[in-house]
Amino acid sequence: MMNQGNTMRKITRSGLQRAGALAGFILAWAGTAAHAVNDLPGGPAVRQLNLPPSATRIAEEQIWLHWFLMGICVVIFLAVFGVMFYSILKHRKSVGHKAANFHKSTAVEIAWTIVPFLIVIGMALPATKVLVAQKDTTGADLTIKATGIQWKWGYDYLKGEGEGIAFLSTLDPTQRQMSDNGGVRAGQMAPDDYLLKVDNPLVVPVNRKIRIITTASDVIHSFGVPSLGIKQDAIPGFVRDTWFRAERVGDFYGQCYELCGKEHAYMPIHVKVLSAQDYSAWVALKTREAAAAKPL
């Protein structure tokens, strides 16, 4: 009896310790949730379920294609499971139905071949149109090389206004320090662009076709900005390209979308879209800074 009592006390103590640990975790999570960020224009939103608002024509077409294909999938799901459950309920043995015995049905075989074929064609045509448009990088007004580096991005303006400008873009040191210290503490306000703020954003003009050439210097990275409708792998020793034409000024955010090492989460992308006049002023400023930095 004594041993049983000791065993029960140990089990109870262990259970209380686990419950306390679980309660601590819940409180810590709740504390973090209490300091949740707000929606970030051009970036992620709180409790976001859909794709972000589009800033380019391609992104708008991607959203339409997403819902179009989703609608087809829902219709197929309802039709297949509707027929299945109707058959199970209305043709069950308990209500007197007997199973039919037949070897084959030519009409059914033709139907289940032609109908899926037509569905696939109906899905492929608009998808192909969007995919082809995404890969048409001809006639660009500005060409920029984006190089993935553990764990930052290098930008080189190769052609167009701003040719010759080059710089690195890394996570904001203040936000990196906040993350290294365990994230947002109780009493702190998390910035809306937490882990998305960089020291040097990629600056481009509005309503201009921007070609992005991607590559990498170490491992595979992926350059993507959802609001602009672009995502392209950056592979060492290879070059890939994509493009966008922003239709409004603003700030748009993305990240490296390929697991690239222990600091993969600290590789944000910030694209700042300016008016033509403001972009020209930015180019002039960067040109003067580069000239001042050159040794005499």
Image: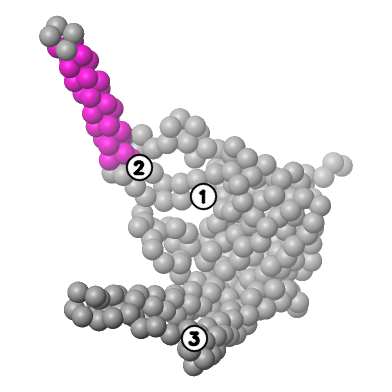
Is-magenta flag for residue 23?
Answer: yes
Task: Identify the amino acid type marked 2.
Answer: Met
Q: Residue 278 or 39: which is nearer the viewer?
A: 39
Residue 41 left/right relative to 81: right
First to last magenta residue range: 5-32
Q: Earlier in the sequence, mark 1 or mark 3?
A: 3
At a point 49% along the width and 93% down the height, the residue shown is 107
Task: Identify the amino acid type marked 1.
Answer: Leu
Residue underneath mark 3: 104
Q: Residue 45 or 289: which is nearer the viewer?
A: 45
How many angstroms separate mark 2 from mark 1 (CA)? 15 Å
Mark 3 closeness class: few <14, some 14–19, many ≥20 residues within 10 Å = few
- In terms of image quadrants, where is residue 213? bottom right
Q: Residue 53 or 110: which is nearer the viewer?
A: 110
Is-magenta flag for residue 28?
Answer: yes
Residue, far top? 2
Q: Where in the figure is residue 27, as x and y percent of width and height?
A: 26, 35
How many angstroms separate mark 2 from mark 3 (CA)? 68 Å
At a point 59% along the width and 43% down the height, the residue shown is 264
